[in-house]
Amino acid sequence: MISRNQLKMIRTLQTKKHRQKYQKFAVEGEKIVREALQECAERIELILVSNPHFRKQDFPIPPSVIWEETDDIGMKSVSSLQTPPGILAVIRMPEPPGPERTQVPWMLYLDGIRDPGNLGTIIRSADWFGITTILFGPGCVDWSNPKVIQASMGSVFRITFMEVDLEMVTTYWPDHPLYAGDIAGDDPRKIIWPEKGILMLGGESHGLTSLVSSLPVCRLCIKRNPGSRAESLNVATAAGILMSMISGSTR
């Protein structure tokens, strides 16, 4: 059985402060744990189970991964979910990437995305449309937040994350044209998308807070139906629509 000290450490991973301190995060649920084993088994330190349905021999676990058991009380004490699924993995953070590792055709730049559900959905959509790098500007929720990971449905393991500011974006990727979601922008259906670029999205309330007018940015707005009375479009929905357009035109 796992020790109380180990349970205490796992419980602290619910906060960003301790995830950064230990350079670890936790994921819950059979699907996401299996995704982690497939995508980053070398970074998994421990798998904790409380449900006897989960047996070690049924998982492709390398020798380096510790398999521990606990009871329902122990699992509930470390779970971030109201109804714990009975299986949890502790994973080491990936090494921070340098710009040389992010020379890919298309990337996302996110600014002020504070809602974990929105970020998790954006990550999942990026994975679906083949965008493998997400750049984080100021004010974004931490990608290792438990709610982000749950909403990503395992896609979080297939995306490279990097914290940057706008100056770094234009310095590291000078040949990637910038496209920004903007309420006053042009209709993206009229855009001829290049083979590479950076799609920039901000929070629904404030938009791209760090975007300065001097940057050579193509501003885009997904047009509202004339009969619609909706105040705004959810940022995760907008991201999916724009990524679909990019993916469809650059295949």
Image: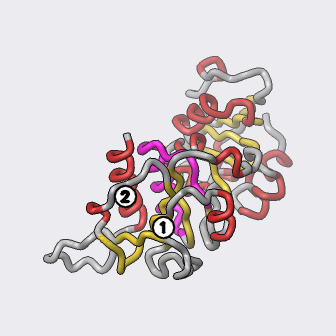
Distance CA(mark 2)–CA(mark 1): 10 Å
Residue 201 shows which numbered tag?
Answer: 1
The numbered disc on residue 140 is none
Q: Position of residue 100 (x, y in %)?
A: 70, 46
Q: Is residue 225 above or below residue 72?
A: below
Give the residues in magenta: 113-135
Q: Secondary structure at mark 2?
A: helix
The amino acid beneath tag 2 is Leu
Marks 2 and 1 in Cβ contact (< 8 Å): yes
Badge 2 density bin: few <14, some 14–19, many ≥20, Cα 10 Å? some
Badge 1: few (under 14), some or many (20 or more) residues near its Cα, within 10 Å?
many
**Most extreme residue toward the left, as rendered?**
227
Q: How is the image coloured?
A: secondary structure
Q: Whole-percent x and y of residue 101?
A: 68, 44
Quadrant in which the N terminus is drawn: top right
Residue 151 appears anywhere in the view: no
- N-terminal of the pair, mark 2 or mark 1, is 1
Q: In the image, is residue 11 part of the stretch drawn in magenta?
A: no
Say which element carries label 1.
strand
Front-lying residue, 124 or 151: 124
Answer with the quarter of the image where residue 184 lies: bottom left
What residue is at 67 percent from the left and 58 percent from the top? Answer: 172
Q: Nearer the viewer, residue 197 or 232?
A: 197
- Residue placed at 55% from the left, 75% from the top? 215
Q: Which mark is residue 242?
A: 2
Quarter-of-image position of residue 158: top right
- Residue situated in front as seen by the camera: 194 or 48: 194
Give me the residue at 34% from left, 71% from top: 221
Residue at 72% x, 48% y: name it: 97
Residue 138, given in percent of the width and then of the height, sits at 64, 72
Q: Amino acid at mark 1?
A: Leu
**Residue 147 placement: quadrant:** bottom right
